[in-house]
Image (cartoon, helix red, strand yellow):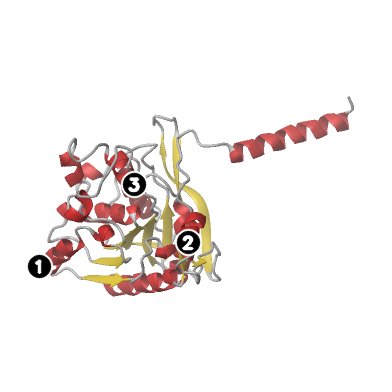
Amino acid sequence: MSLKTTTVIIYFLFFASMVSAQTKAPAFPVDTSYTVANQLRKYQKHYPYLLAAEDELPKGVDGERDVIYTTLKKTEYGKRDLHVDIFRPEKEGKYPAIILIHGGGWKSGNKSLLVPMAQMIAKRGFVAIAVEYQLALEAPYPAAVHNIKSAIRWMRANADKYNIDPERIAISGTSAGGHLASLVGLTNGVEKFEGTMGNESNSSSVQAIIDIDGVLNFMAPLSLNKERRDDSPDVQWIGGQFKDVPERWKEVSPIYWANENSVPMLFINSGYPRFHAGQDELIGMLNEWGIYNDVVKFKVRMHTFWLFHPFIDETVDYMVDFMNKVMK
């Protein structure tokens, strides 16, 4: 065999190994049922004008993908890196930041679902970060909460590097991500939710919360009276039916952690009331404490409106206006 042939074979094997490494399935279980494509198919019959929001870096915005914010050295499936996608204005300065949590019933979806939203927000003068977190099939509650709190601490630890103003960080999420955003935000300073996933010397507190169609009280009638099987997404994530672990159903309900020191909140709703379980009661509490809050409702029978034009455009407008108002 000639030297040239040997070199070609070595190069081919090296290239093949690199491709294999890049396409290798993760060691942990993944549910891929929640995608933009299947949501578009679901709603396009009734809303034929929908256009999926695209991942397209706007002019004047820098983007970094798959930045590791923490490494979990011992999980059921071995070592595990967790990542964020970061979008920020190119111009130097200190900018308020927002962390975005995707939905998918606590068991499906990934951070790419909110990249178009993050890019649009960054274009408006914010550092916007789409976060990866552990889903129910890999690690049920409280892993996701610990992940997200860790990501916020990482944001503060790296504030100078990414032009983040550490005193102005908001949290937002869609559907299950909206629930998580509210739970993380309303438990500012509550030690039991912190976890030990990195940068523990930094604060995980946020200064504002945006809940987009996320449940606030699993024990409210609109939520609790819903028929559930043992493999229902929320049951899997919480770790049991209400009759088996009622104290945990209360613990993961954001409303029970609200207090007079809670931060301003924006609620962006679809036309499905069950996704707003507990919202009216929470708003009453916030009003009693004099904490600013606002509600926006899209009068459409479409849950995942934030994935599509024209609704994502209006959603981003509401988010940016709210953040400018409460995080000046």
Residue at image location 39% in from the left, 29% down from the top: 76
Q: Nearer the viewer, residue 288 or 159?
A: 288
**How many numbered markers are drawn?**
3
Amino acid type, callout 2: Phe
Separation (CA) of disc 2 from disc 3: 19 Å
Q: Residues within 10 Å of mark 1 (few under 14, many from 20)?
A: few
Q: Quadrant of the N terminus?
A: top right
Q: Residues within 10 Å of mark 3 (few under 14, many from 20)?
A: many
Numbered disc in front, either 1 or 3: 1
Is 322 situated left or right of 14 in this image? left
Give the residue pinned by disc 3.
150
* Amino acid type, callout 3: Ser
User: Where is mark 2, residue-wise?
Assistant: 87
Mark 2 / mark 3, whichever is N-terminal: 2
Q: Position of residue 38 (x, y in %)?
A: 49, 55
- Residue 72 - label: none
**Mark with earlier residue (1, 3):** 3
- Tell me the SS state at disc 2: strand
Residue bearing the label numbered 1? 288
| Residue under the point 77% across and 31% down | 10
- Residue 95 seen in render: yes
Q: Going from the N terminus, do you reach mark 1 or mark 2 first?
A: 2
Quadrant for residue 248, please give it.
Answer: top left
Q: Residue furthest left?
A: 288
User: Would residue 297 appear left or right of 187 to someone viewing this image?
Assistant: right
- Residue closer to the observer: 124 or 19: 19
Question: Above or below — where is 141 with respect to 166?
Answer: above
Question: Is label 1 in contact with label 3 (beta carbons under 8 Å)?
Answer: no
